[in-house]
């Protein structure tokens, strides 16, 4: 897996990252100037030629790898391992595989998850197809921390996921499973012409008025899928109503969280969700191989920093 030169040598890894991030000409990470640079005495460090800037930069400046003392080819190995492992890879396993300390492996894993996280406004899902929506509970029973609506009451983390059949997934950590939280998320992330499949939870009951169709399955009657036949101008058509696709996503997510990671605090849950969303949305069934998936994650490093200890 690691036979390529950029997995073996720090300088080759730097050249690979420069080509992947910049192409032929370095781009100043501070002001965005393209090609206006000159080399410094330090290998891989450039100085911006713009009079307003004049700052030094490298391929890791303003990325999740900035200020890291870990060699770049080790970083690339970590990206490859974490993006290729369907159910994730623990920091202990990274620590053993890469030969770095456990603390370094833990920080690397969280920075890579941050690179996987899709930021900004995303186009709505659906495009006239079917989007399945469901929720699950992750973690053991605990008590609601201070600041919650009802401190001291039983509390568990709720995750809601939207999965487009044959497409991508988006997961959200929500406070309560009610229409006040669910409906705004669905409105912002699903196109109005899409068909939505859910179970019969009360939080979804208003969706049929805003989208093309809203079909439900009744789990209380052990109904998990059904097929309906309709007649159109081109003859009979079949419509499959189920939430099995999103349930399949949850099966991978829970196996990873329970079997690989075993524990996740609430403040880090959104990054684990980003990790599983990324791998699912760039899976082999959609034509994305391991190398391409790792390259996509590496491209996500730009403009993101993750520091747990503020610099003095």
Image (cartoon, grey):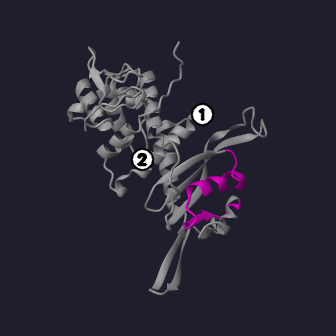
Badge 1 marks a residue whose secondary structure is helix
The answer to whether one can see residue 258 in this image is no
Badge 2 marks a residue whose secondary structure is helix
Q: In the picture, which quadrant includes the N terminus?
A: top left
Locate residue 302 relative to residue 307 in the image: left or right.
left
Q: How crowded is the residue under tag 2: few (<14 C-alpha within 10 Å), some, or many (20+)?
A: many
Q: Residue 166's quadrant in the figure?
A: bottom left
The reply to whether dot 1 and dot 2 touch (C-beta < 8 Å) is no
Q: What residue lies at 31% left-to-right and 28% top-to-bottom? A: 36
In x, y percent, where is residue 88? 43, 40
Q: Nearest the camera: 282 or 92?
A: 282
For marks 1 and 2, give the CA distance: 21 Å
Tell me the number on the disc at residue 277: none
Tell me the number on the disc at residue 279: 2
Q: What residue lies at 20% left-to-right and 32% top-to-bottom? A: 5
Q: Which residues are magenta?
A: 175-202
The answer to whether one can see residue 199 in this image is yes
In x, y percent, where is residue 213? 60, 71
Locate residue 43 relative to residue 92 in the image: left or right.
left
Tell me the number on the disc at residue 267: 1
Q: Nearest the camera: 212 or 152?
A: 212
Q: How crowded is the residue under tag 1: few (<14 C-alpha within 10 Å), some, or many (20+)?
A: few
In x, y percent, where is residue 125? 51, 58
Tell me if residue 304 is in the magenta stretch. Answer: no
Residue 136 position (above or below residue 148): below
Q: Residue 26's quadrant in the figure?
A: top left
Total numbered labels placed on residues in the image = 2
Tell me if residue 194 is in the magenta stretch. Answer: yes
Residue most toward the top? 312
Q: Residue 197's quadrant in the figure?
A: bottom right
Of marks 1 and 2, which one's residue comes earlier in the chain? Answer: 1
Q: Nearest the camera: 193 or 270?
A: 193
């Amino acid at each position: 897996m690691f036979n390529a030169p950029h997995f073996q040598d720090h300088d080759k890894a730097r050249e690979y990252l420069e080509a992947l991030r910049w192409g032929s000409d370095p781009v100043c990470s501070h002001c965005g100037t393209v090609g206006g640079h000159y080399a410094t005495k330090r290998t891989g460090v450039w100085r911006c030629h713009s009079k307003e800037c004049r700052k030094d930069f490298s391929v890791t400046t303003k990325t999740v790898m900035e200020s890291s003392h870990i060699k770049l080819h080790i970083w690339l190995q970590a990206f490859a391992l974490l993006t290729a492992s369907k159910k994730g890879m623990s920091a202990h396993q990274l620590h053993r595989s890469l030969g770095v300390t456990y603390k370094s492996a833990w920080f690397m894993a969280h920075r890579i998850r941050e690179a996987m996280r899709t930021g900004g406004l995303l186009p709505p899902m659906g495009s006239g197809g079917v989007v399945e929506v469901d929720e699950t509970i992750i973690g053991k029973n605990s008590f609601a921390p201070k600041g919650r609506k009802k401190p001291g009451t039983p509390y568990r983390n709720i995750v809601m996921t939207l999965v487009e059949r044959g497409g991508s997934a988006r997961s959200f950590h929500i406070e309560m499973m009610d229409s006040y939280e669910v409906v705004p998320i669905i409105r912002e992330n699903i196109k109005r012409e899409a068909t939505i499949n859910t179970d019969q939870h009360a939080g979804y009951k208003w969706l049929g008025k805003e989208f093309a169709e809203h079909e439900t399955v009744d789990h209380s009657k052990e109904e998990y899928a059904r097929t309906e036949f309709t007649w159109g101008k081109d003859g009979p058509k079949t419509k499959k109503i189920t939430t099995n696709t999103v349930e399949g996503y949850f099966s991978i997510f829970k196996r990873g969280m329970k079997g690989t990671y075993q524990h996740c605090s609430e403040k880090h849950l959104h990054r684990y969700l980003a990790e599983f969303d990324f791998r699912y949305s760039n899976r082999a069934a959609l034509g994305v191989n391991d190398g391409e998936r790792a390259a996509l994650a590496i491209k996500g490093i730009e403009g993101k920093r993750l520091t747990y200890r503020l610099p003095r």
